[in-house]
Image (cartoon, helix red, strand yellow):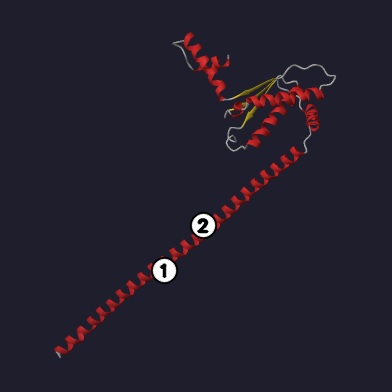
Amino acid sequence: MTTVLTETADQPILQLNTTKYISNINTTETSAEISKRSRADKIKNSNRNTLSHVFLTAILYTLHFIYISFIAFKSLYSYLENLLRDTHQHPHDIHQRIQFDKTQLTKIPEHLTINVSRELASTRSCKEWEKLMYDISMSTCWAWDFGIKEVSVYDASGIMKSVSVDLYKQQSTILHDYMIKYNKGEKIRPALKFSILSIENGKQHMGRVVQEMAKDYPDTIDIPLVDHGLCV
């Protein structure tokens, strides 16, 4: 009887250990499933974020393409419009425009300055430079008709300075022909002063001012004094 009782007592212990072992196995499998499900969710979210990124990037590139196309179309339209106007342009039309401007403008300067863009200097073709020289020459006709006494062309790149002889010749010829044609019977107007300037013109003036200040104020040179010397 003692032996039987011992075997019977040991049996629940074995069953209990077996149950505990199975419980541990089930817990490990559940954690693996959770980890696997978490990785799947991360992959799904990553794919969703990737699709959103691709979609937003496509929209951005589409808007950029539309903007570039609009700028190109606008530039082409302006170019064709200017080309058509220049093809059919007649000196008499220019005179009519000037007369129209006289009825619209109320404040006329004594000195007209034309600033040539430095950013476009390297991209202009020879034909575009010739067109620019012609426009500048015609602007002196506009200035003379308005009674402006001086016209200055400032080109920081110095290209206009290098072709100044041709520009002076063209400007004087165009203005002379305009004056003869449209100044019939009117009073004699003062001569128009035409100048071509570049960045080099200011260096000589600054050098002269510095020399004069160094001579007159060797110990008291400051920023206000330099500003005063440049304005004199």
* For the residues bearing labels 1 and 2, Cβ distance under 8 angstroms: no
Identified by mark 2, the residue type is His
User: How many labels sit on residues?
Assistant: 2
Instruction: Decide which of tag 1 and tag 2 comes sooner along the chain.
Output: 1
| Image quadrant where one finds the C terminus | top right
Q: Which mark is residue 186?
A: none
Q: Quadrant of residue 30?
A: bottom left
Q: Which residue is mark 1?
A: 37
Measured as percent of width and height from the top left, residue 75 is found at 66, 43
The image shows residue 24 at horizontal and vertical percentages of: 30, 74
Q: From the viewer's perspective, is 55 left or right of 195?
A: left
The x and y percentages for residue 93 are 80, 33
**Vertical relation: 23 (above or below) 171:** below
Which amino acid type corresponds to the residue marked 1 in the rendered image?
A: Arg
Nearest the viewer among 138 and 62 is: 138
Element marked by disc 2 = helix
- What's the residue at 66%, 37% (across, down)? 127
Q: Nearer the viewer, residue 229 or 133?
A: 133
Tell me, for residue 53, which label it has, or none: 2
> Residue lying furthest right in this view?
185
223 or 155, nearer to the observer: 155
Q: Residues within 10 Å of mark 2 (few under 14, many from 20)?
A: few
- For residue 67, above or below residue 47: above
Dot 1: within a 10 Å radius of its alpha carbon, few (fewer than 14), some, or many (20 or more) residues? few
What is the distance, in whole Å, between disc 1 and disc 2 at their CAs? Answer: 24 Å
